[in-house]
Amino acid sequence: MLDETINKLEEKLKVGGNELKGAHETMRNLGKQIADKELKVSTLEGDLRIEREWRQSLQESDVKDKEEICKLNMEIQKLRLLKNDLETARLENQDLHRICREQEEALAEMGAKYREKVLREDGLREANATVSSYVWKDSRECTHCKECTLEFTLTRRKHHCRNCGDVFCQRCSDNLMELPSHAKPVRVCDPCFSALLQRCNNTTTPQATLTTSDLPGSQSSLQTPTDTTSISS
């Protein structure tokens, strides 16, 4: 009886020893698994730390990029203002060029007018040089027309040329022309009329009316006497 009990105990002991060995083997396997898990955890923690540092670096880079974008936007705004200023300056420059061209044209026109005035003054000096030879003829001393030489009669009246002062008939003095010494167009003889027109063409005067200050034979200082005895007009 005792032997059976001992045998049973020994068998249980063997079974317990085997179970203990299995438990130790299981513990070793679990230890290996735990070590592997801890290694994986450590690796994951390292990766996580690296990812956090990377994310933090990205955030810092994002902040820097935003600051750089803000600076670039400010530079773009400044460039736009400079562009507007440049466009304004370009328009002002165009206006200045236009004004300069207009002033140059005005100066050229003034120069042309000045040259024309000089020519007119030269013509006046030339005309004044010949004026001394012209005198207002006394109609009572004139019996024949200076141009056609026909004798004056009651029907062929005497007429003074307001430019040269000679006496002509109606046919030889039927021209009207503006003279400096008269406010309205006055009578001039055919020779004076032709000479005045020729002088006008030579000096290229653009005016429609003519003045004796531009032309030879002018008598701007010639005064018409109030001769009540003359039949000239």
Image (cartoon, rainbow, N blue to C red):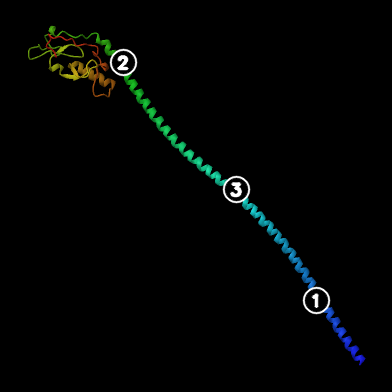
- Left/right of residue 210 with respect to residue 66 in the rendered view: left
**Outermost residue to the right:** 2
Query: Which comes before the other along the chain, label 3 or label 2?
Result: 3
Rendered location of residue 45, percent (x, y): 72, 62
Which of the 4 image quarters holds residue 192?
top left
The disc at residue 122 is: 2
Distance between the alpha carbons at the discs numbered 1 and 2: 138 Å
Mark 3 surroundings: few (<14), some (14-19) or many (≥20) residues within 10 A: few
Q: Nearer the viewer, residue 103 or 33?
A: 33
Q: Is residue 109 above or below residue 95?
A: above
- Left/right of residue 58 with respect to residue 114 in the rendered view: right
Question: Is disc 3 placed on a helix, strand or loop?
Answer: helix
User: What type is the residue that disc 1 sits on?
Assistant: Thr
Which residue is at 36% across, 27% downward? 106
Distance between the alpha carbons at the discs numbered 1 and 3: 61 Å
Q: Which residue is mark 1?
A: 26
Which of the 4 image quarters holds residue 149?
top left
User: What type is the residue that disc 3 sits on?
Assistant: Glu
Image quarter of the N terminus: bottom right
Question: Is disc 2 placed on a helix, strand or loop?
Answer: helix
Rendered location of residue 152, percent (x, y): 9, 11
Q: Which residue is mark 3?
A: 68
Distance between the alpha carbons at the discs numbered 3 and 2: 78 Å
Q: Is residue 37 above or below residue 216?
A: below
